[in-house]
Image (spheres, helix red, strand yellow):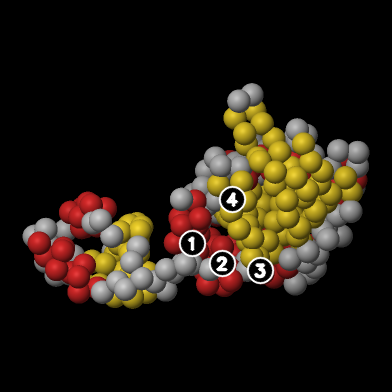
Amino acid sequence: MSIHISNISKSYKNVKALQDISFDVKAGELFGLIGPDGAGKTTLFRILTTLLIANEGTATVAGFNVVSDYKNIRNSVGYMPGKFSLYQDLTVEENLEFFATIFGTTIEENYELIKDIYVQIEPFKARRAGKLSGGMKQKLALCCALIHKPKVLFLDEPTTGVDPVSRKEFWDMLKRLQQKNITILVSTPYMDEAALCDRIALIQDGKILEIDTPEAIVKHYPKPIYNVSANNMYQLINSLNAYKHNHSVYPFGEFVHYTDNRTDFNPEDLKVYLESKNLSNINIDKTVATIEDTFMELAK
């Protein structure tokens, strides 16, 4: 295993950031840690990259213990924290040269590894990092994390605050990096990005809810789910929440995702109820559960 985590727990005074976390990441796998802000993702990343020590449990990265072999881990991993942390007063090229020097290598030595990414920011190599756009900062940070050819790459919410086009480009880059036999552990609060991973772990309040492939996790959703729409979204949500047979009610784009607690649910019964609440243009259609639906169900 490229990453092995066994019964890791971490607390900050009275706050339990991680509670008995255990999972493995295979060599060459693109593994996603999926959860909202405050779920414990960053704390786990800091433990695995030797920046924090867990209160309980053990972990290994690339075969090295995160406590006793911390120096070997720091030479074997690339880490891109959630907040842009490069030197903003240095240019693109100066930042890259600095990190290459720190790891005893050169840009030229591992250029093939970063080429696909670097060619997009090369026209701005003389620009200070602080003057780059969000997407360009992201690409520079990824180049700096890769310049020493790490065995394992840690990416902590790398696409937060980045436009949709740059997000797609970034995930395309990760897929290409995976083909170069780099193990990637990426965290994200975006449920749509979860489907791009080989396997995912859903995390909430420092606890792992489920670990599996995205497809398998969606199949585990226990009930039929329906898209419900009407002329007044606010009134629709309130009416569904007040309906005595509701199991779950969540806004989902232009619809509300609804599940019923009865085994013999008839959509017509729900439509009659909503009409009695003075709603019109009511549509109720069966749909397919998403990872977000599954997460919300497990988090309950």
**Marks 1/3: CA distance?**
17 Å
SS class, disc 3: loop
Which residue, given by chain and number where applicable, does mark 1 sit on?
A: 294
Residue type at mark 2: give it: Ile
SS class, disc 4: strand
Disc 4 versus disc 3: nearer the observer = 4
Q: Earlier in the sequence, mark 3 or mark 2?
A: 3
Residue type at mark 3: give it: Asp
What is the quadrant of the N terminus in the image?
A: bottom right
Which residue, given by chain and number where applicable, does mark 4 sit on?
A: 203
Q: Earlier in the sequence, mark 1 or mark 3?
A: 3
Q: Is residue 271 visible?
A: yes
Residue 100 position in % (x across, y down): 82, 49
Residue at x 26%, y 67% (from the top left corner): 228
- Depicted 174 relative to depicted 146: above or below: below
Residue type at mark 1: give it: Thr
Which residue, given by chain and number where applicable, does mark 2 sit on?
A: 217
Residue 168 position in % (x across, y down): 54, 65
Residue type at mark 4: give it: Ile
Which residue, given by chain and number where applicable, does mark 3 sit on?
A: 198
